[in-house]
Image (cartoon, rainbow, N blue to C red):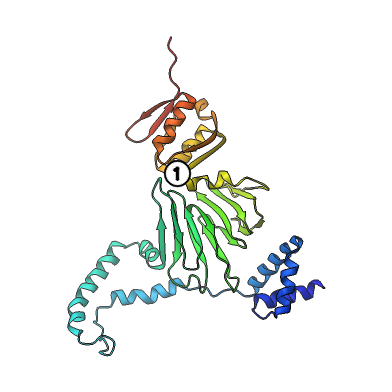
Amino acid sequence: MKPSLTKTIVFDFFDGKATAIQRKYIEAWLADEANQETYYQYLDEWESQRPQFAVDADKALDAFLPVLEDTNPRTLQPKIIKNTPSFWTKHWLGLRIAASVLLVSLLGGFLFRAQLLYTSYQTAYGQTSTVQLSDGTLVVLNANSTLHVPRFGFGSDTRDVFLEGEGEFTVTHTANNQRFIVRTPGNFQIEVLGTEFVVYARERGKRVFLNKGKVKLGLPQGQQLYMKPGNVVTVANSGRYKLTQSAPARPYLAWKEHWFYFDNTSLAEVAQQIQERFGVKVVVTDSLLSQRRIAGNFKAEKADDLLQILSELLNLNIVKTRHHIELSTPKQPY
């Protein structure tokens, strides 16, 4: 069949207009892996031509703030709440005072805005947590991570979430092929065309590992990059990125079971991972020591577990101070 006709059929499928015969054709067409790339290109083009409705959160908030600041008690309709006007009259002043205190305590406005517009899921140091979103998507958050999900419109108008830290996403496909976008600080976003992937977004940079399906990355410079299963993309704070075509899943999923995966990893890098996962600052006192390498898989649910392993493997001295932990090489006797 001609490419133009195939494209028309696929677009009809996305619009929900495809006949039973056309759906069978698409199913057979997608059985050839060579056509799957074209399918995702068609999906991207179809979505671009049909932008989803975006909730104007700022406008909604501006409309809601006067309600909190309103000093005039509202008249309640008896048919809605019967025989309780005195209750609301007595408590309205208390609600106004509470609202005023809240607004003053959140004078900057940003925190209040974020709390009102987003539901936030946060993990503590050393903790992992699984979150199921309203659309069925599962998110496993690594330690010291936060996921912000819009309170209004998510799952119906948009499926945009915001991640700070690290998380694994298993995205649920919707009947209307609604896109799912993970946004991170630094103007970096991942648009889901597949299902399972891991996003790392911390101060040191960004990283995406694709386990199943397909994703499209939006890079800070405006570039777009498609990923296939097994691909890893790392993005430095400078904006430079590196694509690894084929990588094992284990190093990027080990944290879900509290494992550390080291593959010729420097002690300096290990120290940074300890701080990210457990909130413990580790200082390597010697520059040569910081470049020593370690390899292996180690399970550690708290910082002391891993520090003990390092001490035994590398023959290190571990000194705990008030503000950090120091790693050093034992002094040789004269």
Label 1: few (<14), some or many (≥20) within 10 Å?
Answer: many
Q: Is residue 40 left or right of residue 119?
A: right
Residue found farthest to the top? 334
Q: Position of residue 258 (x, y in %)?
A: 46, 44
Q: Is residue 51 left or right of residue 10?
A: left
On the question of residue 286 being in view, the answer is no
Q: Residue at x 61, y 61 (%)?
A: 194
Q: State the image quarter where residue 109 is shown.
A: bottom left
Q: Residue at x 40, y 52 (%)?
A: 123
Judge by depth and name the residue closer to the eye, 65 or 306.
Answer: 306
266, above or below 17, in the image: above
Judge by depth and name the residue closer to the eye, 168 or 21.
Answer: 21
297, above or below 256, in the image: above
Q: Secondary structure at mark 1?
A: helix
What is the number of callouts on the image? 1
Q: Position of residue 21 (x, y in %)?
A: 73, 78
* Residue carrying label 1: 276
155, above or below 236, in the image: below
Judge by depth and name the residue closer to the eye, 288 or 252.
Answer: 252
In the rendered view of the protein, which quadrant contains the N terminus? bottom right
Q: Residue at x 45, y 56 (%)?
A: 130
Under mark 1, the amino acid is: Glu
